Image (cartoon, rainbow, N blue to C red):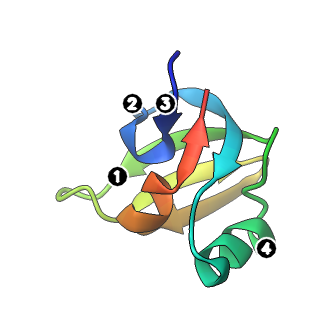
Amino acid sequence: MSQNTIYNLITGQRAVVKSVHANSAIRQRLFDMGVIPSVEVMKERSALGGDPVWIRVGSVQLALRKNEAEAVFVE
């Protein structure tokens, strides 16, 4: 898989976080939620308009805004 973001994953698809490209406040929020490099995530679903996106990190389900999901690059 080429460089992609969490937002572009297909529902049910798993990927590994490679990097987070966001301003310091959003970056820190994602890191606090466990969305850090080398962690596996799975896209569970997205809202009808595509915002928010629900992901699973380990046993935790998180809802990310579109801009947050687009800032997390995965492979």
Q: Amino acid at mark 1?
A: Ser
SS for dot 1: strand
Which is nearer the eye, 71 or 9? 71
Please report the residue visible at 57 percent of the width from the left and 42 percent of the height from the top.
Answer: 73
Please report the residue visible at 79 percent of the width from the left and 61 percent of the height from the top.
Answer: 34
Q: Splitting the image into 4 quarters, where does residue 35 fall? A: bottom right
CB within 8 Å, label 4 to label 2: no
CB within 8 Å, label 3 to label 2: yes
From the viewer's perspective, is the residue at label 1 or at label 4 nearer?
A: 4
Which badge, 1 or 3, comes first in the chain's sequence? 3
Residue 23, compared with residue 45, is above or below; it is: below
Which residue is at the far left? 49
From the viewer's perspective, is the residue at label 4 or at label 2 nearer?
A: 4
Q: Splitting the image into 4 quarters, where does residue 38 fall? A: top right
Q: Residues within 10 Å of mark 2 (few under 14, many from 20)?
A: few
Q: Which residue is mark 4?
A: 32
Which badge, 3 or 4, comes first in the chain's sequence? 3
Disc 1/disc 2 C-alpha distance (Å): 10 Å
Q: Which residue is mark 3?
A: 12
Which badge, 1 or 2, comes first in the chain's sequence? 2
Which badge, 1 or 4, comes first in the chain's sequence? 4
Q: Which residue is mark 2?
A: 10
